[in-house]
Amino acid sequence: MPRLESEINDSFSIGILSDKHSQETYRLKYHRMILVEKGQGTILIDENKFLMGEYQLYLISKGQIFGLTQGNGLSGMVISFGDCFWERSPSSANNCKAMLFNNAADNQRILLQDKEMKELFNLFSSIYSEYIQPAYINKLDAMAAYLKIIMIKIANINLLLAYAYDNFEKQLYRKFLELVSVGYHSRHEVSDYSTQLNITSRRLSELCKRCSGKGAKEIINGQLMAEAKRDLQFTSDTMKQIAYKLNFATPEQFSHFFKKNASASPSEYRSAFIGIGN
């Protein structure tokens, strides 16, 4: 069973990616960006495995299961940061973080062109140079400013953000993702979020379809399923504990929801993935 990631000083770190970067499986306490310059490896993110290769960028959100194994000549850089560190970054970049990390499954791996790789590597190198400097007044704010630039660059690379960045519907959609990312444990209905956004449930579902190809209910259920799968795969919590943690009235209600969305019961799913990540 994976252990929880260790605490990071000031909720920020950056390091050099190598074959020995990690041989364990963690449940992340911090958001992580992995920029792969060269080499190959296998990366585990929740239940999914990816073959790492050159000119790739991985975005992994806090709470996700992460493991890096079978590295072969890997080189690149790794940034980890917490929400409290991100809050040092100017608010003008908040939309970028919301889109990239609040629905991370849609942006898990980004393939980079040569020019994009060089730009990002230079930015990662700049923040690394700042990171290893002796402490000075406003050092953390300087690094947060670099992180803001990196996030904006990544958002621009991501085609999902490349169109209608300032479009009002996009802003509502990103706000919806933010609300779901913190509220899905207890709020399961579209109306729970449309009320907060001061729009109708129908309009929220329609704009989600236009922005992502998924309905609002599908996005909420996706967050619930991702968390349920992590718990089933990587914890020893009982079905009852998981059901109540995710605010289902009964274990039977949770089991029905899970089977409808995964074509397998929670116990069947857990049995199929025993040992993954160990």
Image (cartoon, grey):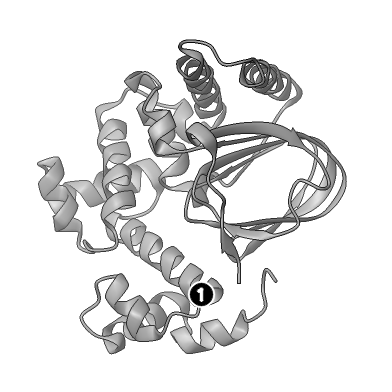
Is 108 positioned to the left or the right of 78 in the image? left
Whether residue 88 appears in this view of the structure is: yes
User: What residue is drawn where x is 48% and y is 16%?
Assistant: 145
* Extreme residue toward the right, this view: 73
Q: Nearer the viewer, residue 106 or 104?
A: 104
User: What residue is drawn where x is 53% and y is 82%?
Assistant: 269
Quarter of the picture containing the N terminus is bottom right
User: What residue is drawn where x is 58% and y is 63%?
Assistant: 3
Residue kind at label 1, given as amino acid type: Thr
Is 27 positioned to the left or the right of 212 in the image? right
Q: Nearer the viewer, residue 2 or 34?
A: 2
Q: How far from the left and from the top, in percent, is residue 19?
A: 83, 46
Q: Nearer the viewer, residue 245 or 42?
A: 245
**Above or below: residue 141 compared with residue 27:** above
Quarter of the picture containing the C terminus is bottom right
Q: Which residue is mark 1?
A: 235
Q: What is the secondary structure assignment of the residue under circle 1?
A: loop
